[in-house]
Image (cartoon, helix red, strand yellow):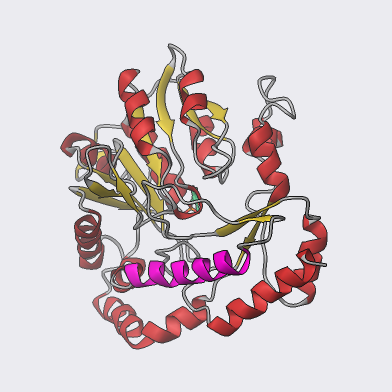
Amino acid sequence: MVDLVGQYKRIQPEVDKAISDVLESSAFINGPEVKSFAAELATYLGVKHVIPCGNGTDALQIAMMALGFKPGDEVITTSFTYVATAEVIALLKLKPVLVEVNPETFTIDPNEFEKAITPRTVAVVPVHLFGQCADMNEVMRIARKHNLRVIEDTAQAIGANYKMKDGTVVKAGTIGDIGTTSFFPSKNLGCYGDGGAMFTNDEELAKKLKMLANHGQSVQYVFDDIGCNSRLDSIQAAVLRIKLRHLDEYAAARNKAADFYDLAFKNITQLKTPVRNPDSTHVFHQYTLVMNGVDRDKLREHLSSKGVPNMVYYPIPVHLQKAYKHDRYAPGSMPVTEHLCKNVLSLPVHTEMTEEDLNYISSAVLEFVSN
Ligand SMILES: *Cc1c(COP(=O)(O)O)cnc(C)c1O
């Protein structure tokens, strides 16, 4: 689904030098590369504070720890997401309240979000799924009205722009109280191992996030809080500093591939191409079709037999997973999400795709659906 080798080859001299510089310096943890990367990412995002951490799951967890929720407090998020979003809520003994997504954009349905609010609700976690922002104007309006905190899961949409109601354009992850992201290798801004970060404009929250990611330590060997150990290492930061300079160019390459597919499948009623949220740019972490009367398993078999990678994100919604099953969530309780899980199919969309690749892949799809 991605070509990380091809991507590396194009920046190899820069990356190899940056890694070897870290090796020479031996500043593997909390070295200057980590501070420089955090500062450069903050500038890119137009946010006051970036706090790097170990991975995107930790970022979500530390964000929720910093906001001081109490066991039993309810946190609303969607069922059509990667499990990490719901997992950290449950892990902190908060109650995940899963709601439906908008069938067009796959992001949280603001009406369903508002309907799910109870006196115990403390926060909402909109997920900017597949590379575009949730309906943040509505999410923020509803959250502010009910005095809820907003944590944006930006693991799939780093670099996306969002147009606020007042016309200002901001980056995904900088709208709510805290934004979180992942630098897992296949994410749009990926390192060569694990990594993650949190963003905020709030000075106090930034201090707290930094402290919690470092064992709750305020001054060396002084621990004010129960925290965790979650660090981005210097080698990953050095790689990310280089890749950050290419991030917009990477998003443009992904959009070019997406536009190609859109055009190829334009008149095919059996395939619904991705719908763009008019307030958000799309950075196409995934290019996801919705099948309309196509046997997805057979199409997948056909594609695989032609050597075309394809994936289902996500085959089982969170509310039907064994670990998250609850009386509130009988099968059929979230028809939109369940329909999507049965009918979505993602095609390769990455930074190294050639016109030839795109032709081959789209022809393989069309061969099947127009038969
Ligand atoms: C990848 C991802 C995460 C988790 O990131 P890790 O770095 O793998 O822990 C969280 N949420 C979403 C939506 C993701 O895609």
For image coordinates 59% across by 84% down, the residue present is 356
Q: Position of residue 350 (x, y in %)?
A: 50, 71
Residue furthest to the bottom in view is: 13
Residue furthest to the front in view is: 267
Specify whether residue 222 is in view: no
Q: Position of residue 313 (x, y in %)?
A: 63, 52
| 194 or 133: nearer the viewer | 133
Taking 220 as reference, is 187 left or right? right
Q: Position of residue 136 (x, y in %)?
A: 36, 38
Quadrant into which the N terminus falls:
bottom right
Q: Is the magenta stretch mostly helix, strand or loop?
A: helix
Quadrant into which the C terminus falls:
bottom right
For image coordinates 17% across by 47% down, the residue present is 48
User: Is 282 covered by the magenta stretch?
Assistant: no
Taking 100 as reference, is 162 left or right? left
Specify whether residue 208 is in view: yes
For image coordinates 75% across by 29% down, the residue present is 331
Q: Which span of residues is magenta-colored?
A: 248-265
Q: Where is residue 25 in the image (x, y as percent from the top left)?
A: 24, 76
User: Is 256 covered by the magenta stretch?
Assistant: yes
Is 46 above or below relative to 308? Answer: above
The image quarter containing residue 192 is bottom left
| 32 or 257: nearer the viewer | 257
